[in-house]
Image (cartoon, rainbow, N blue to C red):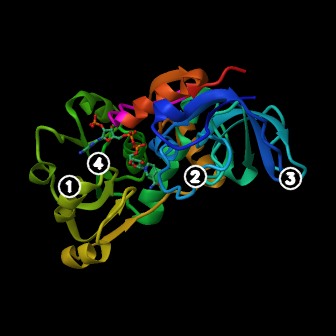
Amino acid sequence: MKAAVIHSYGPVADVVTVGEVPAPAVGPRDVLIEARAAGVNPIDHLIAKGFMQPEGLAQARVLGNEVAGVVAAVGDAVTGFAVGDQVFARVDPQLGAAFAEFVAVDESLVAAKPASISFEEAASLPLVALTAWQALTEQSQLLAGQRVLIHGGAGGVGAAAIQIAKHLGAEVVTTVSADSVELVRGLGADQVVDYRSEKFEEVVAPVDVVLDTVGGDTQDRSFALLKPGGTLVSIVFIPDVEAKKAQWGVQASAFFMHPDGAQLARIAELVASGELRPVVQTVLPLDRAADALTQVERGRARGRTVLSIPS
Ligand SMILES: NC(=O)c1ccc[n+]([C@@H]2O[C@H](COP(=O)([O-])OP(=O)(O)OC[C@H]3O[C@@H](n4cnc5c(N)ncnc54)[C@H](OP(=O)(O)O)[C@@H]3O)[C@@H](O)[C@H]2O)c1
């Protein structure tokens, strides 16, 4: 089958190629998905560069972390899916391998694709929507009536988080650059701050929750905006987290999202009800995986970048 692979770690343009690799084995609990589209995330270019991979690569590695497609086969123990079902999934982070014509995924990570959206739109959702869902429900327990500040509202996680926070009944403040103001207003943001022309800490009233997708100075300046006992949840690194919690009298945590088919089914319900809409910025064919990764690497997202995979 055709797939986007690396044989060594390094800059995307040097190491990412598209070629033939063996199709994945189908374990007893696996759903084999004939992929129609795969979402491209910052983690994909980081993996290509060897981020958090202390060992060199022993064998070719297929990139990619989320997929939408049609079930082509199921393992003997699979009960929830059948050949022909349209599905989507955030794949096992240890296995990756979604930039490929066929992807084997444990059925516990798979959900039925919402019928109202395309495969490209469906492939853009699992990783970012699960991240946003887990940040706002598991990590920070955002409640109706609370105020949340979501940094990077036009990015993959931010755009999903704005909509999920509105679904939860929160008031949403978000930071973007000027060319994304209309986009995030359309997603439901109540207050939009152009972070390049304004200091958000000077124009935003205290919030109950901060969702930090940016880190660094943006994260540092956000602590002062939290109400006493508020929560900062980060999807990037928090240096000196215990000291920050003590200094500001708040909760703070950084976390890695986890794949979860049941939560993804909940996200599919939000899509079906019109409360969560995918925002796809660019669709490129699988053959152009390196270009797609380079676009995501620039970090100026206004929606998602997706690979289309012809059947
Ligand atoms: N921990 C986890 O489980 C997890 C899961 C998913 C992602 N992540 C990480 O979270 C980060 C965001 O992921 P993503 O998929 O949302 O990335 P993305 O789609 O590339 O979006 C990044 C967004 O951040 C905006 N941005 C950059 N600097 C900013 C600033 N100072 N203030 C406000 N917005 C700013 C960018 O837009 P403009 O600069 O044009 O405004 C862009 O829209 C990445 O580092 C990713 O690796 C972690």
Is residue 203 rendered to the left or right of residue 222?
left
Q: Which mark is residue 28?
A: 3
The residue to which callout 2 is attached is 56
Quadrant hosting residue 101: top right
Expressed as whole percent of the image width and height from the top left, the position of residue 227 reads 21, 67
* Dot 1 or dot 3, earlier in sequence: 3
Which quadrant holds residue 16?
top right
Q: Of the residues tagged 2 and 3, which is closer to the observer?
A: 2
Judge depth for marks 2 and 1 and give the one in front: 2
* Discs 2, 4 touching: Cβ within 8 Å: no
Tell me the distance, in whole angstroms, between the alpha carbons under discs 3 and 4.
41 Å
Label 4 residue near ligand 1, CB within 8 Å: yes
- Visible in this render: residue 110? yes
Within 10 Å of disc 2 (Cα), the crowding (few <14, some 14-19, many 20+) is few
Q: Secondary structure at mark 1?
A: helix
Please give the name of the residue rendered at 57% of the width and 57% of the height, measured from the top-left corner. Answer: 55
| Position of residue 13 measured from the top left corner of the image (x, y, whole percent) | 47, 30
CB of mark 1 near ligand 1 (< 8 Å): yes
Vertical side of 221 occupied by 81: above or below: above
Q: Which mark is residue 151?
A: 4
